[in-house]
Image (cartoon, rainbow, N blue to C red):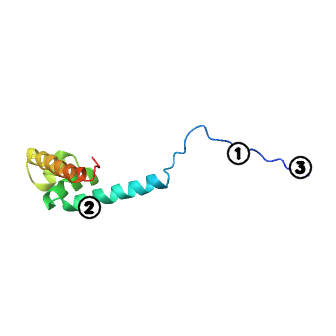
Amino acid sequence: RTRTEIPAEIPDEPAREPGPGDVAEQGWVSWRVHRALEELTDREREVIALAYWSGLSQSEVAEFLGIPLGTAKTRTRAALAHLAELLEEDDLV
């Protein structure tokens, strides 16, 4: 008796879904970023949250906090620099 099986096609492109190693690494990076955010001061974390999670512009952050625009920009730059320092310890930046 003869079986006719369709041969499996080999994809021309690599899989677009991350493999187990990629998923594990992404999970660790995500965890480390959240831990680094917890190490920021409340003021630093506040401007990062407003600008990046809430999607506010620098002007909107300044207005929300009731501070001058230049102060909001300075706080954001300082917070990002501090976050980068914390992440550099783990070679994530």
The residue lying at 68 percent from left, 42 percent from top is 9
Residue 88 position, x and y percent, is 23, 49
Return the residue at label 3. Answer: 2
In the image, 11 versus 45, the foreground residue is: 11
Residue 67 position, x and y percent, is 8, 52
Q: Circle 3 — which element?
A: loop
> Which of disc 3 and disc 1 is earlier in sequence?
3
User: Residue 35 bears which disc, if any?
Assistant: 2
The amino acid type, in three-letter code, at marker 2 is: Arg
Q: Circle 2 — which element?
A: helix
Q: Pointer 2 and pointer 1: residues touching (CB < 8 Å)?
A: no
Q: Quadrant of residue 65?
A: bottom left
Could you tell me how far apart the alpha carbons at marks 2 and 1 are, in whole angstroms? Answer: 45 Å
**In the drawing, does residue 47 fall left or right of residue 34?**
left
Return the residue at label 1. Answer: 8
The residue lying at 19 percent from left, 50 percent from top is 85
Question: Which residue extends farthest right?
Answer: 1
The residue lying at 34 percent from left, 57 percent from top is 30
Could you tell me how far apart the alpha carbons at marks 1 and 3 are, in whole angstroms? Answer: 18 Å
Q: Is residue 32 above or below residue 75?
A: below
